[in-house]
Image (cartoon, grey):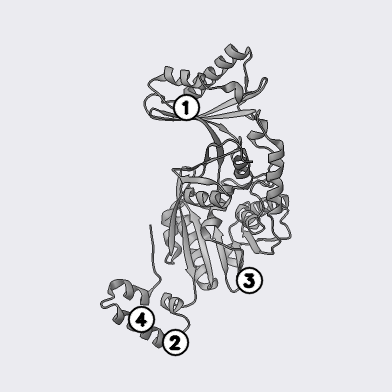
Amino acid sequence: MPGEQFPIIITTYAGLENSLAEELKDLGSQDVLAGRRMVSLKGDMETLYRINYRSRLGLRVLRQLAVFNLTDQNSYYEALGSLPWESWIARDQSIAIDAVVSGKILTHSQFAAQRAKDAIVDRLRNLQGWRPGVDLTRPDIRIHVHVNQDSCHVSLDSSSEPLHKRGYRKAQGDAPLSEVMAAGLIHLSNWSGEGEFLDPMCGSGTIAIEAAMKALNYPAAYFRRFFGFQRWPDFEQKTWDRIKEEGLESRIIADPFIRASDASYKAVANASLNIAQAGFTDLIKLEKKPFQAVFPRRLNGTIITNPPYNERIKSQYNIELYKSFGDILKTRFKGYTAWIFSGDMEALSRIGLRTSARIPLFNGPIECRLARFDLFQGTLVAHKYGDASDEKVKERVLRKRRGHGNAGEGNKEETDNFATHDD
């Protein structure tokens, strides 16, 4: 029987909210509503456990305890002190407070965290005769306080560590791509496991590993060993065991063709270690080579990559890198769809191919785009209307124009080049 229902907040990166909402509905969640960098829903402990174990696109899963309005700093302390913390914190357990604030009543997150700690400790000492310890590294109970103007949301963090920490990444480069963002790129590409999957600038191998996990339907937290809810006083071990068993049984037998490569010895060494940790050494073909030496191995496929760039010599270095990669794509990978994720808009525009989609995303504070390039044979119109001689293609376009009167510039563009759908 389902247990008590309560509000649940799942945080994510800006731009992935709708994708996360879709995923949560697929996991059976009800009353799902996408917001800004978060998705809300109502569920029970089973729902909360399942999201932590299965969600590829969530960062933290918060069990909302209370929402109240503030008039001043004293009302903040009093409201927090009125909550029944003795129900959520057991004797001898440690706590940590994560505070995010904006507005005029509370302006400093460190002060907000300190006052929240004072309110909780004072209540437990006065009512129970003991006080919890504070452990900022790995607390038993992690509490999240979000203050926006005069509104305060108080939650228990059921994940404790963010969910992008899957447990398989043992080595990484200077600017590793988050596992959650990598999974988001794959979700947005609609890759179904068919054709070749290729990351020719793979870094520590995160995109390729997330692709393998998706193709085999591994639970996102398959390799992870700890969640915050396991130390809650009301933790349900039998429910948790059943959720894990359900996730393991959902895995499928598949043989996706996944390749990853990089020009850097260090990157390939890191990727090799991570792929081995995930148990995908036989599944993911990893090679040490620059993208200029990479050739397709299937008639069609999906390329997803996050090219590196040097911030210090950004303009020229990135432009040359991206232009060279665009040349390789259009001459060598016809029949493929390429997705390039980047925070360098100028360099991205130098790929030299028209985009069929540009999806805004934020990689933390960095504004990025996920650009799609359809690398089909010939012209766009031949791709849309099927294989035919140039004369037959032109005849079809002319018939279409006559059927719609003055087709305007849009149809002229269709006969000359790729379609463009920029943001």
Q: CA distance from mark 4 to mark 2?
A: 13 Å
Which amino acid type is shown beneath numbered disc 4? Val
Residue sitting nearer the eye, 153 or 2: 2
Q: Which numbered tag is attached to residue 109? A: 1
Which quarter of the rendered picture does the C terminus lie within?
bottom left
The quarter holding residue 75 reads top left
Q: CA distance from mark 3 to mark 2?
A: 28 Å
Residue sitting nearer the eye, 274 or 181: 181
Residue sitting nearer the eye, 340 or 344: 340
Say left or right for 396 vs 51. Answer: left
Q: Earlier in the sequence, mark 4 or mark 2?
A: 2
Question: Mark 4 highlights which residue?
Answer: 397
Which amino acid type is shown beneath numbered disc 3? Arg
Q: Earlier in the sequence, mark 1 or mark 4?
A: 1
The quarter holding residue 191 reads bottom right
Q: Residue at x 64, y 52 (%)?
A: 267
**Does residue 168 sit above or below 288 in this rendering?**
above
4 or 2: mark nearer the eye = 4
The x, y position of residue 117, in whole percent, is 54, 21
Q: Mark 1: which secondary structure?
A: helix
Q: Earlier in the sequence, mark 3 or mark 2?
A: 3
Q: Mark 2: which secondary structure?
A: loop
Question: Mark 3 highlights which residue?
Answer: 297
Q: CA distance from mark 1 to mark 2?
A: 66 Å
Instruction: Determine contact: label 4, label 2, CB under 8 Å.
Output: no
